[in-house]
Image (spheres, rainbow, N blue to C red):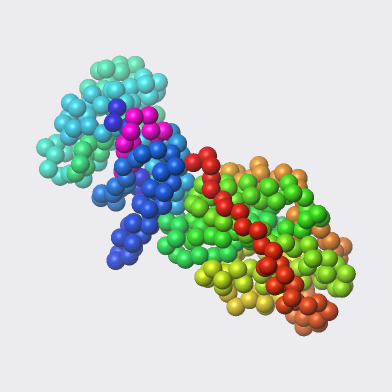
Amino acid sequence: MNDLLLLKQGEIVLKGLNRRIFEQRLLGNLRRRLSRIGKFKVYSAQSTIYVEPEEAGADMDAAFEAAQKLFGVVKVVRAAACEKDKDAILAKAVEYLGEDLAAAKSFKVETRRSDKSFPMTSIELSQYVGGELSERFPQTPVDVHDPDFIVHIEIRDLAAYVHAAPVQGAGGMPVGCNGTAVTLLSGGIDSPVSSWMIARRGVHLIPVHFFSFPYTSQQAKEKVVELGRLLSAYCGKMTLEVVPFTHIQEEIRDKCPEEYFTLVMRRFMMRIARRIALDSGAGAIVTGENLGQVASQTMEAMAVTQAVLDLPVLQPLVGMDKEDIISLARKIGTFETSILPYEDCCTVFTPKHPRTRPKLSEVEAVERTLDVEALVEEALGGVERIALNDESL
Ligand code: ATP
Ligand code: MG
């Protein structure tokens, strides 16, 4: 059958001189992903990446799925290769796409010819193969304007390829080519999506979760681990850092006025995330904040929260509607896990009347009742590290 995958690269083809570096990164990420599925030959030519099975029974379905989750790829298609000869191409189209053609309401043939030495033009080849196919599949008429099914033919340097319509890839840029960031991963709907969006820009992520056992349950942690695993299908190998947060929250509860609980807590999260970032060479902190969604997501509250930082905070969801965030969560497959009912530490000790327009000086005064440095050190000393590898890949 000569079944293979063709992956079309996205923005990286525009990167000029850096293009090779980006492409090498993409190939490396792909090879690492595929090595868990089976033996595949991976190479690139003419802005396309080829994935060929190197052993009988290599799981092409799994490889196809993995390729669709690889950042840096805009389209993925399963194709069959054959000799660059019009009748070999016709025979391959019948063999490989015959079932689709028989089931389609109408069809057309579209040819792309990057090997200009091929003796027929694209139009001539499309007409030849289209004419022959319509004789073999008389119940499926040709419709060049609005076909139900398209037989794609590509004449490339190495061979000819026959395939149906490509599916969309994950887009973006290869993970690792735009640095590293710490991402704050709660168990909610938003932060898996914000993490995904930044990873999609080519950023390697270090997910950090603040865990307040026993106020939040073991299942709440499991849920975050599961979200991290789902993300790793896109982001590659990651290590989740689980920060013990109970003592900090109890200190805040015991020593700060209730209306400041959330703000002080969020400033602790940022201080700890900053330290993890500095220790691991990360250049930014990612959060799932969304303007106006809750009291801590006003501009004033964000300013107070971020005042403890000297790193940029990337908030890709800041201007999105909740509905759009949810549809993205569904698309990337995190939604169903995010809505499992376990509590997050943000909902423990939630103030009844939080400050929505806090002043930095007030919050700083409130924090003087706490030994901030010691609490940060204690939390960092108790970090648990959990390797996230998507086992389904
Ligand atoms: P999410 O759906 O991501 O939980 P949210 O709408 O509940 O977001 P907040 O509770 O205000 O918003 O949290 C804002 C951001 O802070 C989250 O998106 C996440 O990035 C981070 N965050 C909140 N709680 C935690 C936690 N327990 N561990 C790590 N990060 C957290
Ligand atoms: Mg939350």
| Placement of 373 over or under 266, stated as above or below | below
Q: Residue at x 42, y 62 (%)?
A: 177
Q: Which residue is drawn at 29% across and 27% down?
A: 1
* Magenta stretch encompasses residue 360: no
Quarter of the rendered structure image containing ligand 2: bottom right
* Magenta stretch encompasses residue 53: yes
- Between 31 and 105, the one lying in front of the other is 31
Q: Can residue 321 be seen in this view?
A: no
- Between 375 and 181, the one lying in front of the other is 375
Q: Can residue 138 be seen in this view?
A: yes
Q: Which residue is drawn at 11% across and 37% down?
A: 119
Q: From the viewer's perspective, is 62 left or right of 157?
A: right
Q: Position of residue 213 (x, y in %)?
A: 78, 56
Residue sitting at the far front:
381
Magenta stretch: give its range: 50-60
Please identify the quarter of the rendering in which residue 56 is found.
top left
Q: Where is residue 13 in the image (x, y as percent from the top left)?
A: 33, 57
